[in-house]
Image (cartoon, grey):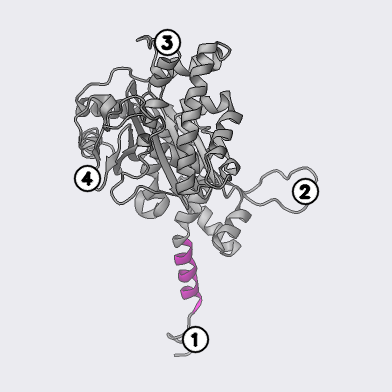
Amino acid sequence: MSGNADPGTPGKGTTTRARLDRGRGALGPALELVHTGRAPTRAVLTAELGVTRATAGAVAAELEALGLIRVDARPGAAAGSQGRPSHRLAVAEDGPVALAAQVHADGFRAALVGLGGRIVATTPGCEVVDADPAKVLGSVVAAGAELLRETGRRCVGAGLAVPSAVAEPEGLALNPLHLAWPAGAPVREIFTEQVRAAGLDGPAFAANDVNLAALAEHRHGAGRGSRDLLCVATGHRGVGGALVLDGRLHSGSSGLALEVGHLPVSSGGRPCHCGSRGCLDVETDPLAFLTAAGRAPGPEVSLLKHADTLIREHYDDPAVRAAAESLIDRLGLGLAGLVNILNPDRIILGGLHGTLLDADPDRLRAVVADRSLWGRSGSVPILPCTLAHNSLVGAAELAWQPVLDDPLGALA
């Protein structure tokens, strides 16, 4: 019939649908680029996605319609620049949030975290951790749910950070020793039950706190731009490690990779709960520092805060300096071993380890370089973590991941 297109020939409608399908497939990658700060403008987004400017514009408009990003179509031009500036892209400050929860030896806290790793609101930290994980997780979820009611934000999901190896796929906290929780506590199942009981939307996740700190720092902090990132940290008790490879956490076959706390760094040192002696876990944490400095840990402040304050404010005290140097040497020995095995392109240190690095960076880097098999460990950048509450931000990243993978599907 005259005027009808040949059904076998792609017409305008087919071309439009094809462009729309390509755009939808690019929504997740585009959102991740904005989320991690790697696409501040539409021009950068176009180049990173490898699509046309029209497709990038349609993708940005769709993400804005979902309430996830904001597009500034009339940005001011930089002084001395020529031509029309590209549309600026940023995460929506009033958009959805993830509920993040963290439990550690000295308390627990809940927070709401938006895209970009931005903490929107936090609860006051609770300093009492019950021996019943269901009671603790019920309390922290209830606190987070109250934040959601107060802010009126939409919740995309919930993530939990715990100071324990978390076995996959069951989500069991295998060694929450400093919490007095039973070994093998099903923390993911309990957390999910509490999230559902609170009437919150979205999936629930749980993982090791240092793994989550590394993920947050890789996307938003000191690890940004690294390909193979090693993170080692000590919080309130013990030492944890994590490895990010090509933007993804390396968790091993069952979630138990990078248990670096049980590397031996002191022959005949303190007994460790793993059955060995002189492990990083008991030789370089806040309790080890306070003991070496001859300071009794008091009940009025956390071990981490007490140790951190001593190093930052009393480093000229001979006992404090000697204790810090002893921990630096043992930490450097452990880091050198990890560098020789993993060959990372960057190391970031969290908690008290970051404070030790700040106190004497040259000593730590010299120890790591000296213990390298090829003398090249000294060239690996060693930096302190930069994000406040990075384990909370990392817990939120777990909840945001389904949205980053498929914005339309997750928010439907």
Residue at 33%, 19% in the rendered image? 126
Tag 4: amino acid: Glu
**Pointers 2 and 3 in contact (CB under 8 A)?**
no
Q: Which badge, 3 or 1, is on the more N-terminal residue?
A: 1
Residue at 60%, 59% in the rendered image? 47
CA distance for labels 4 and 2? 55 Å
CA distance for labels 2 and 1? 50 Å
- Observer-side mark, 4 or 1, equals 4
**Pointers 4 and 2 in contact (CB under 8 A)?**
no
- Observer-side mark, 2 or 3, equals 3
Label 4: state its secondary structure: loop
Query: Vertical placement of 73 versus 49: above or below?
Result: above
**Mark 2 lies on residue:** 81
Work out which residue is located at the far right of the displayed protein and give it: 80
Q: Which badge, 4 or 1, is on the more N-terminal residue?
A: 1
Q: Is residue 352 left or right of residue 208?
A: right
Label 1: state its secondary structure: loop
CA distance for labels 2 and 3? 59 Å
Q: Position of residue 103 (x, y in %)?
A: 32, 28
Residue at 38%, 12% in the rendered image? 297
**Mark 1 lies on residue:** 3
Q: Position of residue 342 (x, y in %)?
A: 46, 48
Q: Which label is found at residue 295? A: 3
Q: Position of residue 145 (x, y in %)?
A: 31, 30
When asked about the image quadrant of residue 101, the answer is top left
Tag 1: amino acid: Gly
**Mark 4 lies on residue:** 170
Q: Which badge, 2 or 3, is on the more N-terminal residue?
A: 2
CA distance for labels 4 and 3? 41 Å
